[in-house]
Image (spheres, helix red, strand yellow):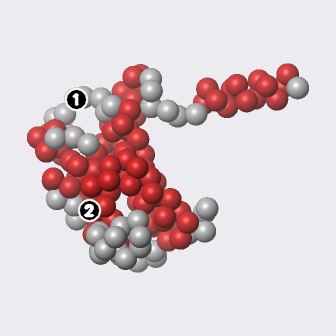
Amino acid sequence: MVTAELSTAEASRSLQTFAAERDRRRLTGTAVNAVLRLARAWGASNAEGAALLGVSESTWDRMKAGTWEGTLSQDQMTRASVLIGLFKGLHLLFANDLADRWPKLENRAPVFDRHSPLEAMIEGGIPRMLETRQYIDALRGGL
């Protein structure tokens, strides 16, 4: 019983919450680079990329130029994590270039209401981003 309790306590300490500044500082560079790459692959504009990550367009421009030295907030890290998971899920689901075209295509699924997933995620913020990720995971049979 004590072993099970320790395992549960250890597991809860190992869950990534992005609450600790040192973790966010450590992960920010990798997260920013990944989001910049997926935004480019998806053909997202500067305004769209900035909105997805939850930063200003001027900050997005500095990120693209490699001159931004900030640390992402907990919400921004959550956005990056969801987007990275979505990117991976799309590439597991679609074996061709549809994986990178899909976010900008009009979608009739109720979660998107005839908007593109990209538009829906920008409009709906983190909750819609999570729904989009769950939608793709469900299509892949992951839920």
Q: Position of residue 55 (x, y in %)?
A: 22, 40
The residue lying at 44 percent from left, 52 percent from top is 130
Label 1: state its secondary structure.
loop
**Label 2 packing within 10 angstroms: few (<14), some (14-19), many (20+):** some
Q: Amino acid at mark 2?
A: Glu
Position of residue 58 relative to residue 88, above or below, is: above
Q: Is residue 4 left or right of 143 when viewed as pictured?
A: right
Disc 2 designates what residue?
Answer: 119
Depth check, front residue: 109 or 105: 109
Q: Position of residue 47 (x, y in %)?
A: 15, 53
Q: Amino acid at mark 1?
A: Glu
Task: Give residue 87's quadrant in the image.
Answer: bottom left
Quadrant for the C terminus in the image: bottom right
Disc 1 designates what residue?
Answer: 69
Depth check, front residue: 61 or 126: 126
Position of residue 2 relative to residue 134, above or below, is: above
| Nearer the camera: disc 2 or disc 1 | 2
Q: Position of residue 60 (x, y in %)?
A: 18, 43
Label at residue 117: none
The residue lying at 77 percent from left, 24 percent from top is 6
Q: Which numbered disc, 2 or 1, marks the residue that appears first in the sequence?
A: 1
Q: Position of residue 39 (x, y in %)?
A: 27, 57
The residue lying at 50 percent from left, 71 percent from top is 93
Q: Is residue 92 left or right of 126 when viewed as pictured?
A: right
> What is the residue that sits farthest to the left in this orientation?
58
Depth check, front residue: 118 or 94: 118
Distance between the Cα atoms at labels 2 and 1?
28 Å
How many circles with numbers are drawn on the protein?
Answer: 2
